[in-house]
Image (cartoon, rainbow, N blue to C red):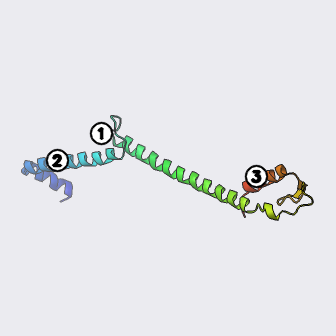
Amino acid sequence: MDKIAALMIDAVEHPSHAKQRIAALEAENERLMRHLESLTPGGSEFHNDPTRCVLWATQQREGVIHQVKLRKAAEAKNERLRAALNHVEWAETPYLSADVAFCPWCGTTDEEGHRVDCMRQAALEPSS
Protein backbone atom coordinates (compact mmCIF):
# COMPACT_ATOMS: atom_id res chain seq x y z
CA MET A 1 0.00 0.00 0.00
CA ASP A 2 1.41 3.38 -0.89
CA LYS A 3 1.90 6.16 1.61
CA ILE A 4 -1.02 8.35 0.47
CA ALA A 5 -3.49 5.51 0.67
CA ALA A 6 -2.26 4.65 4.15
CA LEU A 7 -2.72 8.26 5.27
CA MET A 8 -6.23 8.37 3.82
CA ILE A 9 -7.23 5.16 5.60
CA ASP A 10 -5.71 6.47 8.84
CA ALA A 11 -7.62 9.77 8.47
CA VAL A 12 -10.91 7.93 8.03
CA GLU A 13 -10.31 5.43 10.82
CA HIS A 14 -8.69 7.94 13.22
CA PRO A 15 -9.89 11.49 12.53
CA SER A 16 -8.05 12.77 15.57
CA HIS A 17 -4.72 11.73 13.97
CA ALA A 18 -5.51 13.80 10.87
CA LYS A 19 -6.52 16.79 13.01
CA GLN A 20 -3.32 16.52 15.02
CA ARG A 21 -1.23 16.25 11.86
CA ILE A 22 -2.96 19.28 10.31
CA ALA A 23 -2.44 21.28 13.51
CA ALA A 24 1.26 20.29 13.59
CA LEU A 25 1.71 21.27 9.93
CA GLU A 26 -0.03 24.60 10.44
CA ALA A 27 2.16 25.34 13.46
CA GLU A 28 5.28 24.46 11.47
CA ASN A 29 4.10 26.63 8.55
CA GLU A 30 3.60 29.54 10.94
CA ARG A 31 7.06 29.03 12.43
CA LEU A 32 8.68 28.84 8.97
CA MET A 33 6.84 31.99 7.85
CA ARG A 34 8.08 33.86 10.97
CA HIS A 35 11.64 32.76 10.13
CA LEU A 36 11.26 34.09 6.60
CA GLU A 37 9.79 37.34 7.85
CA SER A 38 12.66 37.71 10.32
CA LEU A 39 15.01 38.05 7.32
CA THR A 40 13.18 41.22 6.24
CA PRO A 41 12.89 44.67 7.83
CA GLY A 42 9.27 43.89 8.69
CA GLY A 43 6.21 45.71 7.51
CA SER A 44 2.88 44.59 6.15
CA GLU A 45 4.24 44.04 2.62
CA PHE A 46 6.14 40.98 3.92
CA HIS A 47 3.41 39.52 6.18
CA ASN A 48 2.48 36.01 4.99
CA ASP A 49 4.20 36.55 1.62
CA PRO A 50 7.08 34.05 1.43
CA THR A 51 7.91 34.97 -2.17
CA ARG A 52 8.40 38.65 -1.28
CA CYS A 53 10.47 37.71 1.78
CA VAL A 54 12.79 35.47 -0.25
CA LEU A 55 13.08 38.07 -3.02
CA TRP A 56 14.01 40.81 -0.54
CA ALA A 57 16.59 38.62 1.24
CA THR A 58 18.11 37.60 -2.11
CA GLN A 59 18.37 41.23 -3.24
CA GLN A 60 20.06 42.16 0.04
CA ARG A 61 22.62 39.38 -0.41
CA GLU A 62 23.29 40.47 -3.99
CA GLY A 63 23.72 44.05 -2.77
CA VAL A 64 26.32 42.93 -0.24
CA ILE A 65 28.18 40.98 -2.93
CA HIS A 66 28.16 44.09 -5.15
CA GLN A 67 29.54 46.19 -2.29
CA VAL A 68 32.33 43.67 -1.73
CA LYS A 69 33.27 43.88 -5.42
CA LEU A 70 33.31 47.69 -5.24
CA ARG A 71 35.44 47.57 -2.10
CA LYS A 72 37.95 45.20 -3.74
CA ALA A 73 38.18 47.46 -6.80
CA ALA A 74 38.78 50.48 -4.54
CA GLU A 75 41.44 48.57 -2.61
CA ALA A 76 43.20 47.64 -5.88
CA LYS A 77 43.16 51.26 -7.02
CA ASN A 78 44.44 52.30 -3.61
CA GLU A 79 47.36 49.89 -3.98
CA ARG A 80 48.18 51.34 -7.43
CA LEU A 81 48.08 54.86 -5.99
CA ARG A 82 50.34 53.87 -3.10
CA ALA A 83 52.78 52.24 -5.54
CA ALA A 84 52.85 55.41 -7.63
CA LEU A 85 53.48 57.53 -4.54
CA ASN A 86 56.31 55.20 -3.52
CA HIS A 87 58.03 56.06 -6.81
CA VAL A 88 58.16 59.70 -5.86
CA GLU A 89 61.70 60.35 -4.75
CA TRP A 90 61.84 64.13 -4.70
CA ALA A 91 65.13 64.17 -2.84
CA GLU A 92 66.77 61.85 -5.37
CA THR A 93 65.48 63.61 -8.48
CA PRO A 94 68.61 64.84 -10.32
CA TYR A 95 68.57 68.59 -10.78
CA LEU A 96 70.08 70.43 -13.75
CA SER A 97 69.85 73.63 -11.81
CA ALA A 98 67.88 74.94 -8.88
CA ASP A 99 64.86 75.61 -11.15
CA VAL A 100 64.75 72.55 -13.45
CA ALA A 101 64.42 68.84 -12.61
CA PHE A 102 63.99 65.59 -14.49
CA CYS A 103 60.54 64.03 -14.39
CA PRO A 104 60.99 60.53 -12.85
CA TRP A 105 58.19 59.10 -15.05
CA CYS A 106 58.86 60.46 -18.52
CA GLY A 107 62.47 61.63 -18.19
CA THR A 108 61.91 65.11 -19.58
CA THR A 109 62.91 68.28 -17.85
CA ASP A 110 59.93 70.29 -16.86
CA GLU A 111 58.26 72.07 -14.02
CA GLU A 112 56.85 70.38 -10.93
CA GLY A 113 53.29 70.53 -12.32
CA HIS A 114 54.38 68.31 -15.19
CA ARG A 115 55.78 65.76 -12.73
CA VAL A 116 52.49 65.75 -10.81
CA ASP A 117 50.58 65.06 -14.06
CA CYS A 118 52.91 62.15 -14.83
CA MET A 119 52.48 60.86 -11.28
CA ARG A 120 48.70 60.92 -11.69
CA GLN A 121 48.96 59.03 -14.98
CA ALA A 122 51.24 56.42 -13.38
CA ALA A 123 48.73 55.98 -10.53
CA LEU A 124 45.88 55.32 -12.98
CA GLU A 125 47.79 52.67 -14.94
CA PRO A 126 47.26 49.11 -13.68
CA SER A 127 50.32 47.69 -12.00
CA SER A 128 51.97 44.79 -13.80
Answer whether labels 3 and 1 touch (C-beta < 8 Å). Answer: no
Specify whether 83 is left or right of 67.
right
Tell me the quarter of the picture where residue 52 sits: top left
Q: Position of residue 17 (x, y in %)?
A: 10, 51
The circle on residue 22 is 2
- Give the alpha-carbon distance from disc 2 to disc 3, as whole Å: 70 Å
Give the amino acid at mark 2: Ile
| Circle 2 or circle 1, nearest the eye | 1
Q: On screen, 22 above or below 98?
A: above
Separation (CA) of disc 3 from disc 1:
55 Å
Q: Which mark is residue 48?
A: 1
**Which of the two residues, 89 or 8, is positioned nearer the viewer here?**
89
Q: In terms of sequence position, does the residue under pointer 3 or pointer 1 come before the other?
A: 1
- Find numbered disc 1 in the image and state the secondary structure of the residue it sits on: loop
Farthest residue to the top: give it.
44
Q: Which residue is mark 3?
A: 120
Q: Residue at x 84, y 62 (%)?
A: 93
Viewer-side label of 3, 1: 3
